[in-house]
Amino acid sequence: MRKKVTKAIFPVAGLGTRFLPATKSVPKEIMTLVDRPLVQYAIDEARAAGIKEFIFVTSRGKGALEDYFDNAPQLEQELRRKGKDELLEILKSTNMESGEIAYMRQHKPLGLGHAVWCARRLIANEPFAVILPDDVIAGDKPCLAQMVEAFEETQSNIVAAMEVPEDQASSYGVLDIKEDMGAIVSTKGMVEKPEFGTAPSNLAVIGRYILTPTVLQKLNKKRTGAGGEIQLTDAIADAREDGEEVYGYRFKGQRFDCGSKAGFLQATVAFALARDELRDDLWAYLNDVVHSEKAAQ
Ligand code: UTP
């Protein structure tokens, strides 16, 4: 029988040190692109891919994240009273049904692989998606929905992949390609953060995965890898070594690394320019900046 992906894990237990001091009290995933927190983009993408159960792996200090998904009856009442129907609809669209969302704690930031492992009891014996909310992907068809379609064919592990320049490969997990079939590549394995000059290809893994329960079993070993962390990439590579297929998927869309300041700022500009009510003013401002910059040179 063909398996369906209905559960997604959102690992959000990282320290977010690149955004200190903000992340002293604000979880990175609550930071907003225009007016929506990163985590809302992730939830919307998961829903569009048919996900029904949303599992967050959180940590100390992420209370604001749980509050964000609560209903806000007082606020809704006030908006209704003032006739602000549009805002009311926006607010309602962020509500999560009771029982749809679950939270697990990762007690120590031991790495992405460990965060995913923390959710193992809620996954049991099914394929599942992993979404890193700080990778935001803009495109006509949401990235995870593209991957779910590919999974319907392959029924095996799929990781989102994109080409990166050679000097950036050591920041990513990198695919060891067996056969390049265009949108999909089959792999011999993958390496987390390869040393400069040793990357097996220029196809890097970014924050969307569809994985089989075998990967969770491999995470049971709790092996530490690059950076002294328990790496998800290593567990996927182990599953591949055991004979499971692992595919890379070249998604269509533009990925923003919102875990870095530069990526976050680029995403802010891109998402603001995509909004009718903001585009003209922002565009005029950006033009001014470019012109005065050029004039000064
Ligand atoms: P990052 O590598 O971006 O780490 O994690 P970070 O802690 O969030 O941010 P910096 O590097 O200190 O600025 C990638 C993803 O893995 C999750 C993070 O929350 C993020 O979604 N993660 C990482 C965990 O859930 N637990 C961990 O132990 C490590």
Image: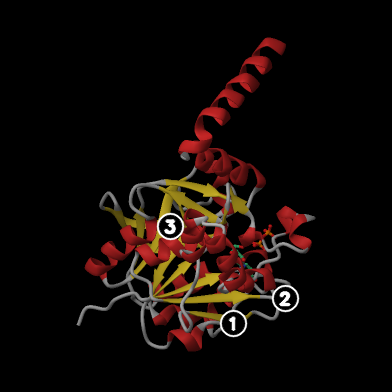
| Displayed quadrant of residue 58 | bottom right
Label 2 Cα neighbours within 10 Å, binned few <14 / some 14-19 / many ≥20: few
Residue drawn at point x = 38 percent, y = 77 percent: 212
Disc 3 target residue: 175
Which residue occupies the extreme left position in the image? 1
Q: Which marked residue is nearer to the observer: mark 3 or mark 1?
A: 1
Q: Please say if the residues under marks 1 and 2 sit with CB atoms less than 8 Å apart.
A: no
Q: Amino acid at mark 1?
A: Met
The answer to whether residue 256 is seen in the rendering is yes
Drawn side of residue 151 relative to residue 123, left or right: left
| Residue at the (66%, 46%) spot, across then down | 261
Q: Earlier in the sequence, mark 3 or mark 2?
A: 2
Question: What is the x, y in percent for residue 166?
Answer: 52, 42
Element on which disc 3 rests: strand
Residue named by callout 1: 104
Q: Is residue 170 above or below residue 237?
A: above
- Image quarter for ligand 1 equals bottom right
Q: Position of residue 283 (x, y in %)?
A: 54, 27
Q: Kindly report the distance in space between the C-alpha atoms of the residues bearing marks 1 and 2.
A: 11 Å
3D distance between C-alphas at marks 3 and 2 = 33 Å
- CA separation in Å, label 3 and label 1: 30 Å
* Ligand 1 closer than 8 Å to label 3 CB: no
Answer above or below: position of 29 versus 289. Answer: below
Measured along the vertical axis of the image, is residue 69 above or below residue 295? below
x, y percent for residue 105: 64, 81
Task: Report which quarter residue 68 is drawn in.
Answer: bottom right
Identified at 55% across, 44% down, the residue is: 267
Q: Amino acid at mark 2?
A: Arg
Instruction: Report if the CB atoms under discs 3 and 2 are less than 8 Å apart.
Output: no
Residue designated by label 2: 60
Residue 201 is labelled as none
